[in-house]
Amino acid sequence: MANNTAKNPNQKNKKAAKGGMPPRMSFINMIAIVILIFLLITGIYAQFSSKKDLSTQTSLSAIASDVKKGTITSLSIQGDQIIATYPDKSTKTAQKEVDSSLTESLTRLGVTPQQLASTTIMVEQPSGFWYWTGQLAPFLAPILFLIFFIWLISRQMRGAGMQALTFGQSKARITLPSDTKQKVTFKDVAGAKEAKQELFEIVDFLRNPKKFIEIGAEIPKGVILMGAPGTGKTLLARAVAGEAGVAFFSISGSEFVEMFVGVGASRVRDLFKMAKEAAPAIVFVDEIDAVGRARGSGMGGGNDEREQTLNQILVEMDGFEPNEKVIVMAATNRPDVLDPALLRPGRFDRRVTIDLPDRGDREAILKIHAIKKQLAEDVNMIVIAERTPGFSGADLASLMNEAAILAARENRTSIGQFDLIRSIEKVMLGPERRSHVLSPKEKEITAYHEAGHALVSSVLPHADPVHKISIISRGRAAGYTLKLPFEERRLQSRLQFLDDIAVSMGGHVAELLVFGDITTGASNDLQVATALARDMVTRYGMSEKIGPVALESAQGRVLFGMGVNDREYSEKVAAEIDGEVTRIMTDAREVALKTLTVNRKAFEAIAKRLIDVETIEREEYEKILVAQGIEVKKKDELVEPKKIV
């Protein structure tokens, strides 16, 4: 069980690794295959060559005797062989004398011309491709086998040599301006208006560098795209190249680093050399934090190869001339760990931040991903955009794809609004697990647990309104409560955080209030609430006892610290932090307990309805609240915060 909200959904964006055998094993296997083929050919040849000896061998005098008796129907001469055919179709073979003809040989053996005339004599001169192949095969087969074996050995050695020579070459993927299939423009990228405006200057420079150079302006050599995973950093970089109509060299930061020192630096040199030759061009390094981490911080393992690669990138960027017409773009979702030398003016001195899309941007992104999909008439993208706050562009693409899969699975030819609604929950929480059947007691506990979350969220003034409650398992959660804000938020207040923590404690308190015991279903709620309470104390300065001090960074490490376990506050402060976190959690539990106790009838009504129908949508849920005398939240009520007494 979990109290899942749509404010912070899980975010989801390499080249697939190609498997294969080690070179030595592959070479040994090839040799074994060649030997087997040779043995097979030898066996086949031996089999066919033995077939010509199926007839009975006899002497020439015996053939002459049978001719005298008239028991031979025909005589066939094939080279130095005489084949006698009898009335019963049997054959006998004899060796012909080399220095005389068959007629002379038979005459000397007493066969008269009259007896010879009664026997058909045929002379066959073997010729043709298969005859000569059979004659030459015993000599040619070993020679051809040796030639093939030598060629195979030389090919293996040449391949190893070429691999060694190309080991330091760049593995960048190149997209040429003429490649219309992979071309992306700003029309294909919805949202990110400010980012596209910043990047359009780069496009203008690549299209018409003369006007910048004449006035003495220098375009930034490097542009770094920063944003959460899935926000479209790589897509924007490709769109810049597509708009400018220039070559696009893309490579991942991890592709520079190898086990051999110096290979990464060599690949960097080769990459920039290719880009200069193809100028105007864009060099795009994805996940640059793989090689661009701060040097000397102890992070990244102190890899000499990584640092040499970073040094080479810095040198190459310094070597650019103002009119080089090569722009370096990079993407990362961890700008805080990058080396300061990488971000200084003259290198990656232009930083473009790409935020998660707002409601309007999400609607535009959904429409782009819906272009090639068959939509039903009831589809309303505005509703879907409103129900997906916190979704990235990649999440929205996955949402549309999941909706199409759901419709196809049910043998429908178009995607309906119901498919899109279901796919939202699937992307956020995972697929339904209807095979995960709860016992009647577990179903009752889950219903009261989720009812506790929902009611606390509906009563507290700074919590988000509830859109759906379900006790159908999804992912790892036995049930979930979906609550969404009325409008987009860029800032969170202290009172909103406190109400969110109280909502997370609602399920835990509900179990204790109804059953007098607690289960493991609240474990995720406690983890989320505790992490939020600690952030309030250590990051946001929202504790009166600790004061307005930032003690930790967003990643849980001390600001400007040297390692994961280092911290710049004393054990006394650490104890005070733990005490404040415990106080916040305890106060939130009391608020949740008071809320459920005062509104016990509504709490019971929601839980019993959940047990009956398993899922309650927003409209039905609000009717239950109104029937129990609880006022439904409206948008205007969340404008001015009110303190809870």
Image (cartoon, rainbow, N blue to C red):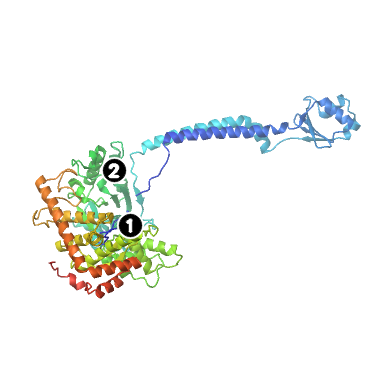
Residue 195 location, x and y as percent? Answer: 24, 60
In front here: 24 or 585? 585
* Residue nearest the observer in this picture, 379 or 84: 379
Quadrant of the image occupied by residue 410: bottom left
Residue at mark 2: 268
Q: The N terminus lies in which quarter of the figure? A: bottom left
Q: Which mark is residue 423?
A: none
Q: Secondary structure at mark 2?
A: helix
Q: Quadrant of residue 244?
A: bottom left
Is 444 left, or right, of 346 in this rendering? right
Alpha-carbon span between mark 2 and mark 1: 24 Å
Q: Which comes sooner in the sequence, label 2 or label 1?
A: 1
Task: Confirm whether residue 386 shows in the render.
Answer: no
**Dot 2 alpha-carbon crowd within 10 angstroms: few under 14, some 14 to 19, many 20 or more:** many
Judging by the rendered image, the residue that carries numbered circle 1 is 245
Q: Are marks 2 and 1 in contact (CB under 8 Å)?
A: no
Left or right: where does residue 405 sit relative to residue 123? left
Q: In the rendering, at what x and y percent does residue 45 appear?
A: 64, 33
Q: Which element is circle 1 on?
A: loop
- State the quadrant of the C terminus: bottom left
Determine crowd level at label 1: few under 14, some 14-19, many 20+ residues with C-alpha closer than 10 A. Answer: some
Horizontal side of 513 relative to 166 (left or right) equals left
User: Up-down: is 506 above or below 41?
Assistant: below
Q: Nearer the viewer, residue 630 or 43?
A: 630
Name which residue type carries label 2: Val
